[in-house]
Image: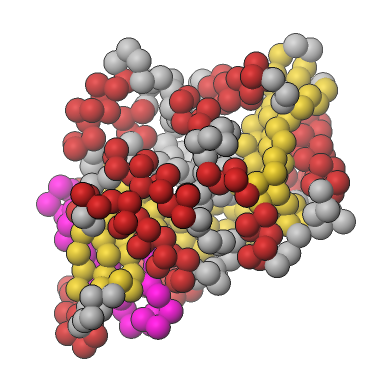
Amino acid sequence: MIIQMVQSRKDLKDFINLPYRLYKEDPNWVAPLRSEQWAQFDPQKNPMLDHCEKTLFLLKSGRRVVGRCAAFVDHQAVEHWGESIGLFGSFECIENINGAHLLLNVARDWLVRKGMKGMRGPWSFASQEWGLEIEGGDRPPVILAPHNPPYYADFFETFGLHKAIDLMAYEADMAQGYQFPERYLTLTDVVQSRYGVTVRSVNMDDIESEVMTIVEISNKSLADNWGYYPVTPEEARAMARDLKAIVNPDALLIAENEMGEPIGFALSLPDVNTLLKGLNGYLLPVGWLKLLFGLKKIRQYRMWGLGVVPEYQGKAIDTLLYKATYEALKDFNVSMEINYVLEDNHRMNNALLKLGVTPIRRYRVYEMVIA
Protein backbone atom coordinates (compact mmCIF):
# COMPACT_ATOMS: atom_id res chain seq x y z
CA MET A 1 0.00 0.00 0.00
CA ILE A 2 1.19 3.51 -0.81
CA ILE A 3 0.23 7.08 0.09
CA GLN A 4 -0.55 9.57 -2.67
CA MET A 5 -1.24 13.27 -2.21
CA VAL A 6 -4.39 14.63 -3.88
CA GLN A 7 -3.13 16.85 -6.70
CA SER A 8 -5.68 16.66 -9.50
CA ARG A 9 -9.42 16.83 -9.93
CA LYS A 10 -9.45 13.09 -10.54
CA ASP A 11 -7.62 12.54 -7.25
CA LEU A 12 -10.19 14.72 -5.47
CA LYS A 13 -12.99 12.74 -7.10
CA ASP A 14 -11.42 9.52 -5.77
CA PHE A 15 -11.12 11.14 -2.34
CA ILE A 16 -14.77 12.24 -2.28
CA ASN A 17 -16.19 9.03 -3.75
CA LEU A 18 -14.44 6.58 -1.40
CA PRO A 19 -17.03 6.60 1.43
CA TYR A 20 -19.84 5.80 -1.01
CA ARG A 21 -18.04 2.55 -1.78
CA LEU A 22 -16.83 1.72 1.73
CA TYR A 23 -20.26 2.19 3.35
CA LYS A 24 -22.30 0.64 0.56
CA GLU A 25 -23.37 -2.29 2.73
CA ASP A 26 -23.78 -0.33 5.96
CA PRO A 27 -27.55 -0.07 6.61
CA ASN A 28 -27.11 2.91 8.93
CA TRP A 29 -24.89 5.10 6.78
CA VAL A 30 -26.60 8.01 5.02
CA ALA A 31 -24.83 9.10 1.85
CA PRO A 32 -24.35 12.89 1.93
CA LEU A 33 -25.11 14.86 -1.19
CA ARG A 34 -22.12 14.60 -3.49
CA SER A 35 -22.50 18.23 -4.52
CA GLU A 36 -22.11 19.26 -0.87
CA GLN A 37 -19.01 17.12 -0.50
CA TRP A 38 -17.43 18.80 -3.53
CA ALA A 39 -18.36 22.22 -2.09
CA GLN A 40 -16.72 21.38 1.23
CA PHE A 41 -13.32 21.24 -0.48
CA ASP A 42 -13.90 24.26 -2.73
CA PRO A 43 -12.47 27.56 -1.39
CA GLN A 44 -15.01 29.45 -3.51
CA LYS A 45 -17.89 27.74 -1.69
CA ASN A 46 -16.55 26.96 1.80
CA PRO A 47 -15.36 30.10 3.65
CA MET A 48 -13.86 27.97 6.41
CA LEU A 49 -11.04 27.24 3.97
CA ASP A 50 -10.13 30.94 3.99
CA HIS A 51 -8.32 30.37 7.29
CA CYS A 52 -7.17 26.81 6.68
CA GLU A 53 -4.03 25.36 5.14
CA LYS A 54 -4.74 21.80 4.08
CA THR A 55 -3.60 18.75 2.19
CA LEU A 56 -5.44 15.55 1.30
CA PHE A 57 -4.02 12.05 1.12
CA LEU A 58 -5.14 8.85 -0.56
CA LEU A 59 -4.18 5.32 0.47
CA LYS A 60 -3.86 3.00 -2.51
CA SER A 61 -3.53 -0.74 -2.88
CA GLY A 62 -2.36 -1.14 -6.43
CA ARG A 63 -4.57 1.23 -8.41
CA ARG A 64 -7.49 0.93 -5.99
CA VAL A 65 -8.18 3.66 -3.40
CA VAL A 66 -8.71 2.03 0.00
CA GLY A 67 -8.30 4.96 2.40
CA ARG A 68 -8.12 8.72 2.76
CA CYS A 69 -7.22 11.41 5.28
CA ALA A 70 -6.99 15.20 5.47
CA ALA A 71 -4.41 17.15 7.45
CA PHE A 72 -4.89 20.85 8.01
CA VAL A 73 -3.96 23.85 10.07
CA ASP A 74 -6.89 26.08 10.94
CA HIS A 75 -5.17 29.37 11.71
CA GLN A 76 -8.34 30.78 13.25
CA ALA A 77 -8.39 27.90 15.73
CA VAL A 78 -4.66 28.08 16.47
CA GLU A 79 -4.95 31.79 17.26
CA HIS A 80 -8.04 31.39 19.46
CA TRP A 81 -6.73 28.35 21.33
CA GLY A 82 -3.26 29.80 21.78
CA GLU A 83 -1.82 26.37 20.98
CA SER A 84 -0.08 24.97 17.90
CA ILE A 85 -2.57 22.17 17.34
CA GLY A 86 -3.08 20.81 13.83
CA LEU A 87 -6.09 18.81 12.75
CA PHE A 88 -6.83 15.63 10.85
CA GLY A 89 -10.14 14.48 9.44
CA SER A 90 -12.10 13.05 6.49
CA PHE A 91 -10.59 9.78 7.66
CA GLU A 92 -11.81 6.60 5.97
CA CYS A 93 -10.04 3.27 5.57
CA ILE A 94 -10.67 -0.38 4.90
CA GLU A 95 -10.23 -2.66 7.92
CA ASN A 96 -6.44 -2.73 7.72
CA ILE A 97 -4.50 -1.33 10.65
CA ASN A 98 -1.25 -0.93 8.71
CA GLY A 99 -2.97 1.13 6.04
CA ALA A 100 -4.71 3.24 8.68
CA HIS A 101 -1.40 3.95 10.40
CA LEU A 102 0.16 4.96 7.09
CA LEU A 103 -2.55 7.60 6.69
CA LEU A 104 -2.25 8.89 10.26
CA ASN A 105 1.52 8.94 10.02
CA VAL A 106 1.59 11.03 6.84
CA ALA A 107 -0.92 13.45 8.37
CA ARG A 108 1.23 13.75 11.49
CA ASP A 109 4.41 14.33 9.48
CA TRP A 110 2.76 17.04 7.40
CA LEU A 111 1.54 18.84 10.54
CA VAL A 112 5.01 18.64 12.09
CA ARG A 113 6.45 20.29 8.99
CA LYS A 114 3.89 23.06 9.44
CA GLY A 115 5.20 23.71 12.95
CA MET A 116 2.38 22.07 14.88
CA LYS A 117 3.04 20.57 18.33
CA GLY A 118 -0.13 18.51 18.57
CA MET A 119 -2.58 16.65 16.32
CA ARG A 120 -6.32 16.53 17.03
CA GLY A 121 -9.29 14.93 15.30
CA PRO A 122 -11.30 13.68 13.59
CA TRP A 123 -12.22 17.24 12.59
CA SER A 124 -14.20 18.40 9.59
CA PHE A 125 -14.22 21.19 7.05
CA ALA A 126 -17.89 21.63 8.00
CA SER A 127 -18.54 23.82 11.04
CA GLN A 128 -18.79 21.97 14.39
CA GLU A 129 -18.68 18.48 12.87
CA TRP A 130 -16.23 16.65 15.09
CA GLY A 131 -15.40 13.29 16.56
CA LEU A 132 -15.51 9.57 16.09
CA GLU A 133 -18.80 7.86 16.87
CA ILE A 134 -18.00 5.35 19.61
CA GLU A 135 -21.54 4.70 20.91
CA GLY A 136 -24.85 4.84 19.06
CA GLY A 137 -23.65 3.65 15.67
CA ASP A 138 -26.52 1.18 15.48
CA ARG A 139 -28.80 3.95 14.21
CA PRO A 140 -28.45 6.33 11.26
CA PRO A 141 -26.63 9.61 11.93
CA VAL A 142 -28.51 12.89 12.05
CA ILE A 143 -27.72 15.88 9.86
CA LEU A 144 -24.11 17.16 10.18
CA ALA A 145 -23.02 14.27 12.41
CA PRO A 146 -20.39 11.61 11.70
CA HIS A 147 -20.84 7.87 11.30
CA ASN A 148 -18.03 5.32 11.16
CA PRO A 149 -17.12 1.67 11.74
CA PRO A 150 -16.28 0.78 15.36
CA TYR A 151 -12.77 -0.39 14.44
CA TYR A 152 -11.62 3.16 13.70
CA ALA A 153 -11.18 3.67 17.45
CA ASP A 154 -8.64 0.84 17.52
CA PHE A 155 -6.82 2.38 14.56
CA PHE A 156 -6.44 5.66 16.43
CA GLU A 157 -5.55 4.27 19.83
CA THR A 158 -2.91 1.84 18.57
CA PHE A 159 -1.35 4.72 16.65
CA GLY A 160 -0.90 6.62 19.90
CA LEU A 161 -3.85 8.98 19.81
CA HIS A 162 -5.71 9.30 23.09
CA LYS A 163 -9.02 10.74 24.21
CA ALA A 164 -9.17 14.53 24.32
CA ILE A 165 -12.88 14.82 25.09
CA ASP A 166 -16.21 13.08 24.51
CA LEU A 167 -19.30 14.68 23.02
CA MET A 168 -22.72 13.50 24.17
CA ALA A 169 -26.03 13.22 22.30
CA TYR A 170 -29.49 12.89 23.83
CA GLU A 171 -32.96 12.16 22.54
CA ALA A 172 -36.40 13.50 23.41
CA ASP A 173 -38.92 11.47 21.42
CA MET A 174 -42.32 13.11 21.60
CA ALA A 175 -43.85 10.38 19.44
CA GLN A 176 -42.90 7.92 22.20
CA GLY A 177 -44.49 10.05 24.89
CA TYR A 178 -41.76 12.47 25.94
CA GLN A 179 -43.17 15.49 27.75
CA PHE A 180 -41.46 18.55 29.13
CA PRO A 181 -41.49 18.09 32.94
CA GLU A 182 -44.31 20.03 34.60
CA ARG A 183 -42.12 21.45 37.36
CA TYR A 184 -39.92 23.18 34.78
CA LEU A 185 -42.90 24.81 33.13
CA THR A 186 -43.41 26.75 36.35
CA LEU A 187 -39.70 27.53 36.59
CA THR A 188 -39.56 28.98 33.09
CA ASP A 189 -42.60 31.18 33.82
CA VAL A 190 -40.73 32.58 36.81
CA VAL A 191 -37.59 33.14 34.71
CA GLN A 192 -39.51 35.02 32.05
CA SER A 193 -41.16 37.22 34.66
CA ARG A 194 -38.01 37.89 36.72
CA TYR A 195 -35.70 38.77 33.85
CA GLY A 196 -38.22 40.06 31.33
CA VAL A 197 -37.08 37.50 28.77
CA THR A 198 -39.07 36.72 25.66
CA VAL A 199 -38.40 34.08 23.01
CA ARG A 200 -39.21 34.55 19.34
CA SER A 201 -38.69 32.64 16.13
CA VAL A 202 -36.42 34.03 13.44
CA ASN A 203 -37.58 36.33 10.69
CA MET A 204 -37.06 34.41 7.46
CA ASP A 205 -37.30 37.62 5.44
CA ASP A 206 -34.10 38.77 7.16
CA ILE A 207 -32.42 35.40 7.67
CA GLU A 208 -28.87 36.64 7.06
CA SER A 209 -29.17 39.28 9.79
CA GLU A 210 -30.78 36.75 12.13
CA VAL A 211 -27.98 34.24 11.58
CA MET A 212 -25.43 36.98 12.21
CA THR A 213 -27.18 37.63 15.55
CA ILE A 214 -27.01 33.93 16.42
CA VAL A 215 -23.33 33.82 15.50
CA GLU A 216 -22.60 36.87 17.67
CA ILE A 217 -24.33 35.19 20.62
CA SER A 218 -22.48 31.96 19.88
CA ASN A 219 -19.10 33.68 19.75
CA LYS A 220 -19.78 35.26 23.16
CA SER A 221 -21.45 32.34 24.90
CA LEU A 222 -19.24 29.50 23.68
CA ALA A 223 -15.89 31.29 23.53
CA ASP A 224 -14.49 29.32 26.49
CA ASN A 225 -15.96 25.95 25.45
CA TRP A 226 -13.43 23.28 24.59
CA GLY A 227 -12.65 23.22 20.87
CA TYR A 228 -14.70 26.27 19.97
CA TYR A 229 -13.32 29.17 17.97
CA PRO A 230 -15.15 32.15 16.47
CA VAL A 231 -17.27 31.84 13.36
CA THR A 232 -16.36 34.46 10.76
CA PRO A 233 -18.92 36.77 9.08
CA GLU A 234 -18.29 34.97 5.78
CA GLU A 235 -19.08 31.63 7.40
CA ALA A 236 -22.22 33.12 8.94
CA ARG A 237 -23.43 34.32 5.54
CA ALA A 238 -22.78 30.87 4.03
CA MET A 239 -24.65 29.31 6.94
CA ALA A 240 -27.62 31.61 6.29
CA ARG A 241 -27.75 30.55 2.65
CA ASP A 242 -27.61 26.87 3.58
CA LEU A 243 -30.18 27.15 6.36
CA LYS A 244 -32.71 29.04 4.28
CA ALA A 245 -33.26 25.99 2.11
CA ILE A 246 -34.16 23.61 4.93
CA VAL A 247 -34.90 25.44 8.17
CA ASN A 248 -38.20 25.46 10.03
CA PRO A 249 -38.34 29.03 11.42
CA ASP A 250 -40.40 27.86 14.40
CA ALA A 251 -37.39 25.81 15.53
CA LEU A 252 -34.89 28.65 15.18
CA LEU A 253 -35.31 30.67 18.35
CA ILE A 254 -33.77 33.82 19.81
CA ALA A 255 -34.19 34.92 23.44
CA GLU A 256 -34.25 38.64 24.16
CA ASN A 257 -34.13 40.63 27.40
CA GLU A 258 -36.60 43.32 28.39
CA MET A 259 -34.69 45.87 26.31
CA GLY A 260 -34.98 43.71 23.21
CA GLU A 261 -31.31 42.71 23.22
CA PRO A 262 -30.54 39.16 22.03
CA ILE A 263 -29.16 37.04 24.90
CA GLY A 264 -29.57 33.44 23.75
CA PHE A 265 -30.53 31.13 20.92
CA ALA A 266 -31.60 27.58 20.19
CA LEU A 267 -31.12 26.21 16.70
CA SER A 268 -32.87 22.98 15.73
CA LEU A 269 -32.71 21.58 12.21
CA PRO A 270 -34.99 19.16 10.36
CA ASP A 271 -32.98 15.99 9.90
CA VAL A 272 -32.77 15.90 6.11
CA ASN A 273 -30.81 12.65 6.44
CA THR A 274 -34.20 10.95 6.70
CA LEU A 275 -34.84 12.08 3.11
CA LEU A 276 -31.32 11.45 1.77
CA LYS A 277 -31.43 7.77 2.67
CA GLY A 278 -31.31 5.69 -0.49
CA LEU A 279 -30.31 8.51 -2.86
CA ASN A 280 -26.60 7.55 -2.87
CA GLY A 281 -25.73 11.23 -2.78
CA TYR A 282 -27.57 12.27 -5.95
CA LEU A 283 -30.45 14.75 -6.30
CA LEU A 284 -31.18 13.57 -9.83
CA PRO A 285 -33.33 12.15 -11.21
CA VAL A 286 -35.85 12.01 -8.30
CA GLY A 287 -33.95 13.07 -5.18
CA TRP A 288 -34.87 16.75 -5.51
CA LEU A 289 -38.56 15.81 -5.56
CA LYS A 290 -38.10 13.79 -2.38
CA LEU A 291 -36.54 16.80 -0.69
CA LEU A 292 -39.04 19.30 -2.09
CA PHE A 293 -42.12 17.43 -0.90
CA GLY A 294 -40.59 15.81 2.16
CA LEU A 295 -39.07 18.73 4.07
CA LYS A 296 -42.26 19.85 5.78
CA LYS A 297 -43.09 16.25 6.72
CA ILE A 298 -39.86 15.57 8.60
CA ARG A 299 -40.45 14.43 12.17
CA GLN A 300 -36.80 13.92 13.14
CA TYR A 301 -34.85 16.99 14.28
CA ARG A 302 -31.39 17.78 15.56
CA MET A 303 -30.80 20.53 18.11
CA TRP A 304 -27.57 21.77 16.58
CA GLY A 305 -26.75 24.65 18.86
CA LEU A 306 -27.78 26.46 22.01
CA GLY A 307 -26.05 29.39 23.67
CA VAL A 308 -26.65 32.03 26.32
CA VAL A 309 -24.44 35.12 26.74
CA PRO A 310 -22.28 34.99 29.89
CA GLU A 311 -24.19 37.59 31.90
CA TYR A 312 -27.38 35.52 31.65
CA GLN A 313 -25.86 32.10 32.24
CA GLY A 314 -26.98 30.26 35.38
CA LYS A 315 -30.42 31.90 35.19
CA ALA A 316 -32.26 29.00 33.48
CA ILE A 317 -32.44 30.79 30.12
CA ASP A 318 -31.27 27.53 28.53
CA THR A 319 -34.24 25.71 30.11
CA LEU A 320 -36.52 28.44 28.77
CA LEU A 321 -35.14 27.82 25.26
CA TYR A 322 -35.60 24.04 25.61
CA LYS A 323 -39.21 24.66 26.65
CA ALA A 324 -39.83 27.01 23.73
CA THR A 325 -38.39 24.45 21.31
CA TYR A 326 -40.58 21.73 22.83
CA GLU A 327 -43.70 23.86 22.53
CA ALA A 328 -42.91 24.76 18.92
CA LEU A 329 -42.63 21.11 17.86
CA LYS A 330 -44.69 19.02 20.29
CA ASP A 331 -47.84 18.95 18.15
CA PHE A 332 -45.86 17.30 15.34
CA ASN A 333 -44.68 14.35 17.49
CA VAL A 334 -41.07 15.17 16.73
CA SER A 335 -38.10 13.08 17.83
CA MET A 336 -35.36 15.53 18.81
CA GLU A 337 -31.69 14.59 19.00
CA ILE A 338 -29.66 17.08 21.06
CA ASN A 339 -26.21 16.75 19.54
CA TYR A 340 -23.44 17.63 20.62
CA VAL A 341 -22.92 18.42 24.32
CA LEU A 342 -19.37 18.47 25.68
CA GLU A 343 -18.97 15.93 28.46
CA ASP A 344 -17.34 18.55 30.69
CA ASN A 345 -20.30 20.91 30.29
CA HIS A 346 -21.79 19.64 33.53
CA ARG A 347 -24.41 22.37 33.75
CA MET A 348 -25.93 21.48 30.39
CA ASN A 349 -25.64 17.70 30.83
CA ASN A 350 -27.28 17.89 34.26
CA ALA A 351 -30.03 20.17 32.93
CA LEU A 352 -30.79 17.78 30.08
CA LEU A 353 -30.96 14.75 32.37
CA LYS A 354 -33.31 16.63 34.69
CA LEU A 355 -35.48 17.35 31.67
CA GLY A 356 -35.84 13.59 31.19
CA VAL A 357 -34.04 13.15 27.87
CA THR A 358 -32.22 9.90 27.07
CA PRO A 359 -28.46 9.56 26.33
CA ILE A 360 -28.13 7.80 22.96
CA ARG A 361 -24.71 8.53 21.44
CA ARG A 362 -21.14 9.37 22.30
CA TYR A 363 -18.48 10.83 20.02
CA ARG A 364 -14.78 11.07 20.84
CA VAL A 365 -12.15 13.56 19.73
CA TYR A 366 -8.57 12.27 19.91
CA GLU A 367 -5.24 14.06 20.17
CA MET A 368 -1.54 13.42 20.60
CA VAL A 369 1.70 15.32 21.04
CA ILE A 370 3.68 15.28 17.78
CA ALA A 371 6.66 17.56 18.50
On whether residue 109 falls in the magenta region, the answer is no
Residue 235, image x, y percentages: 47, 49
Q: In this view, does 359 lie to the left or right of 109?
A: left
Please state, as top left, top right, bottom left or bottom right, where the N terminus lies in the image. top right
Q: Give 43 or 368, whichever is nearer the viewer.
A: 43
Give the residues in magenta.
Answer: 306-333
Image point (57%, 21%), residue name: 17
Give the tally of numbered discs: 0
Q: Residue furthest left?
A: 331
Q: In the image, is residue 282 above or below residue 207? A: above
Residue 115, image x, y percentages: 83, 53
Quadrant of residue 180 in the image? Answer: bottom left
The reply to whether residue 163 is in sight is no
| SS majority, magenta | helix
Q: Which colour scheme is used?
A: secondary structure
Residue 121, image x, y percentages: 66, 49
Image point (72%, 36%), residue name: 55
Quadrant of residue 357 in the image? Answer: bottom left
The reply to whether residue 346 is in sight is yes
Image point (63%, 58%), residue name: 77
Q: Is residue 75 left or right of residue 333?
A: right
Q: Give 16 or 258, whichever is nearer the viewer.
A: 258
Q: Give 370 or 9, whichever is nearer the viewer.
A: 9
Q: In this view, does 121 lie to the left or right of 334?
A: right
Quadrant of residue 266 in the image? Answer: bottom left
Residue 302, image x, y percentages: 35, 49
Q: Which residue lies furthest to the bottom in this view?
A: 194
Q: In the image, is residue 301 above or below residue 267? A: above
Image point (53%, 61%), residue name: 230
Please state, as top left, top right, bottom left or bottom right, where the C terminus lies in the image. bottom right
Q: In the image, is residue 314 above or below residue 153? A: below
